[in-house]
Image (tube, rainbow, N blue to C red):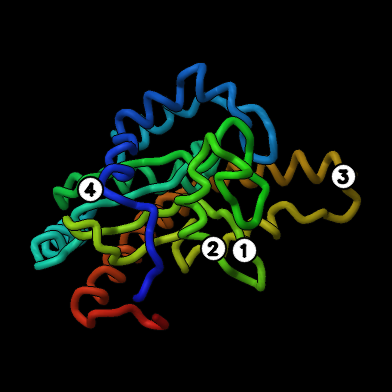
Amino acid sequence: MERKQSVVTPERFAKGMTFEQYVAYVGTAENLKREASQGGARRDWSGYLRQAYDGARLSEAQTAAVKWLAAQPNGPAKILVIAEEWSSDCRRDLPMLARLAEAGGMELRIFRRDGQRFSRSQRPSLAEAPDGNADLMAEFLNEKNGQVWQSIPVAVFYTKRLEYLYHYIEYPAIYHKDRVVGHLRAPRPGESPEETQKRGERAFFDMLDSPFFRVWRCAAVDEMLSALHERLVVGSLAGC
């Protein structure tokens, strides 16, 4: 894949947080005073992330696959992640990305997406949000259904020399999130708007506690490993 000049330099990559640093940051007053999704208040997800990491395990096949990939010439050696802990997709994938990096001996660095305010722009810029990482986000926007989104998490894989290999956005292909969540939150006959909101929110969080959340967590890793294998073996990715 041919890519334009990237803002991801060795110096910029090194400024990202390790998984341990990010989890600690999530619980700080500095982070909690920032706007969350749609300008809401943040909650401390650091305990959840630690527990999720403690329980996260790669399968034998996933472990063997990432070790094989990392051992190849110009194989993956660095992972840049753009995330915000208010995102359920980030909470799902970050612990597994940390495990993946460990198993492959890769360097993981995490960057927050926003500054003090939640970014609503379709195409973010540092002029609009100088205290965030809008320039990083602008390189990996999610274009779907004729629109552009600042979808997270973004996980970008690079070689040791910081050569781009592949990036993953938001959720694995088998998780049809918009369709599933849209159905869960859709009005039911006889419900008031308030009842719909409460029931839909409860159904969504019940889903996050279900086994399917763990299924999609594993599927995300499988999707990343398969794409990296294709990139190294074929030299490019389908559609690129």
Q: From the top left corner, tell me how far across and down residue 238 is, in percent.
A: 37, 82
Q: Image quarter for residue 19?
A: top left
Q: Quadrant of the C terminus?
A: bottom left
Marking on residue 148: 1
- Residue sitting at x 52%, y 47%: 134
Q: Which residue is mark 3?
A: 193
- Residue sitting at x 55%, y 45%: 126
Q: Which residue is mark 2?
A: 142
Q: Which residue is mark 4?
A: 101
Q: Earlier in the sequence, mark 3 or mark 1?
A: 1
Q: Image quarter for residue 168?
A: bottom left
Q: Earlier in the sequence, mark 4 or mark 1?
A: 4
Q: Are marks 3 and 4 in contact (CB under 8 Å)?
A: no
Q: Is residue 130 shown above or below 232? A: above
Query: Secondary structure beneath disc 1?
Result: strand
Q: Are marks 2 and 1 in contact (CB under 8 Å)?
A: yes
Q: Is residue 150 shown above or below 68? A: above
State the CA–CA distance, disc 3 to disc 2. 30 Å
Q: Nearer the viewer, mark 4 or mark 2?
A: 2
- Residue sitting at x 55%, y 23%: 32
Q: From the top left corner, tell me how far across and down residue 99 is, in percent.
A: 25, 45
State the CA–CA distance, disc 4 to disc 2. 24 Å
